[in-house]
Image: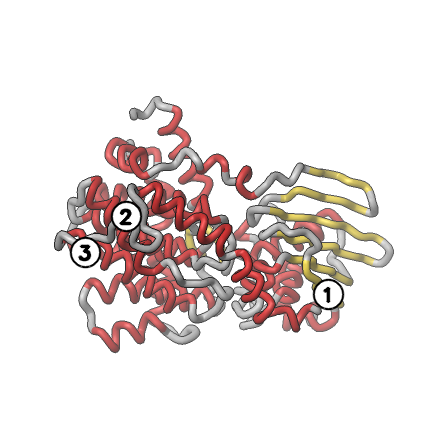
Amino acid sequence: MDRQDAIYQEYVEILTRELVPSLGCTEPIAIAYCSAVARSVLGHVPDRIHVEASGNIIKNVKSVVVPNTGGLKGIETAAAIGALAGDENAGLEVISNIGEENILKKTGYLDNTKITVSPAASDLVLDIIVTAFYKKEWAKVRIAQTHTNIVLKEKNGTVLFSAPIVSEEAHESNLTVLNIKDIYKFVEICDLNDVQEVLERQIQMNTNISQEGLQRNYGANIGKVLLKAHGNDVRTRAKARAAAGSDARMNGCELPVVINSGSGNQGLAVSLPVIEYAENLGVGKEKLYRALLLANLVTLHEKAGIGRLSAYCGAVSAGAGAGAGIAYLHGGTYDCIVHTIVNALAIASGMVCDGAKASCAAKIATAVEAGILGFEMYQQGQQFYNGEGLVAKGVENTIDNISRLGRVGMKETDRVIIRMMVEADYE
């Protein structure tokens, strides 16, 4: 592989597209974005809003604080802030530049606007439809499969824009080019000028929110708990840094993060442990950049087969990716990285996603621990073998097994979780 190869260019494009900033949890932000676009199509701030959302969207919005709302949660809050003050051109940063603090409370918009919610009629995992009304006019906007993928704009019955809704697998087909062998080759030969801006943004934004999480009180303060309970060694700091970022993000912090696979928590889990180990080892920026390239691409590869949203906790994939990055920082060979990934996935693959909330920080810490332990096992000549549980012969076969578990095996688990969490709220 060299810089002129098509696969090299695809990897750079994937990183540029996937490692983008988002303010707040991506599911409520996607609702806010859809609502802001609907307001733009309508041409007025709506006096009534109806939101249709798939179960996984409802699950992930239910318990997480929406930034710039004064600590409010829920679909109604996300739709209201997007409709009132969101920037329809800003994607996942739709509510980043709201000048007036707590504008929903000050204007009374949320209290005085009828906002209704119902489950989406489709079987799509990620599906949001916002219908905004103003007097006798109305506008409808639909997002499907990924958090900013608009497939419909309609006003007063006239379709202004329509795009086909392809299957989730087809939508992620551009990620099928990823495999561990080529990822490793890319990491080794990558011209860092092609990726430096993306990676530096990830370092700066994710470090900033992690520091915020350690300095102030957010949620269950898992980052602080780890440091107080287990000390200040690099292993604990790596977990605490990632957890603290999630502490802040899940509980309304108004700082952006750089996401991975559509998730800010995965973006935090895959990057902050690698950054912490790089600082502890005293490696230069070049080594850190390459380790982050590896960690991010491994995580994207793992998640491509599972899907953006599922009952499978995405932190597990990110923790394995972080473990690979940490192995690389220690001079790990290709074999070392492969075994680190397999070991990490074997340790923590039973963890479920029961929505975005404060406990995500603790799950991140657990996933990062699995990544670190996976690397330490290889260091000491230990590994999990083909046929032991979901471990198969070869890293790609093991990743395929985890993908089947998350996408196929956990479908009914996902339905049960959603029913237990939210069915009563939106019957």
Query: Can see residue 226?
Result: yes
Q: Is residue 199 left or right of residue 170?
A: left
Query: Can see residue 102?
Result: no
In this rendering, is residue 12 above or below 302? Answer: above
Q: From the image, tell me which residue sits under label 2.
A: 386
Q: Residue at 21% across / 63% down in the picture? A: 235
Q: Residue at 39% across / 58% down in the picture? A: 315
Quadrant the N terminus occupies? top left
Quadrant the C terminus occupies? bottom right
Q: Secondary structure at mark 2?
A: loop
Residue closer to the observer: 298 or 381: 381
Q: CA distance from mark 1 to mark 3?
A: 51 Å
Q: Secondary structure at mark 3?
A: helix
Residue closer to the observer: 8 or 377: 377
Q: What colouring style does the render use? A: secondary structure
User: Residue 300 at x, y = what percent?
Assistant: 40, 45
Name which residue type carries label 1. Answer: Thr
In this rendering, is residue 198 above or below 85? Answer: above
User: Residue 205 at x, y = what percent?
Assistant: 38, 54
Name which residue type carries label 2. Answer: Asn
Indicate which disc, 1 or 3, sits on the residue closer to the N terminus: 1
| Residue extending furthest toward the top | 4
Q: Is residue 5 left or right of residue 47?
A: left
* Image quadrant in which you'd find residue 134: bottom right
The numbered dot on residue 116 is 1
Q: CA distance from mark 2 to mark 1?
A: 51 Å
In this rendering, is residue 136 above or below 64? Answer: above
Q: Residue at 77% across / 62% down in the picture? A: 48
**Contact flag, marks 2 and 1 (Cβ < 8 Å):** no
* Image quadrant in which you'd find residue 100: bottom right
Q: From the image, tell me which residue sits under label 3.
A: 377
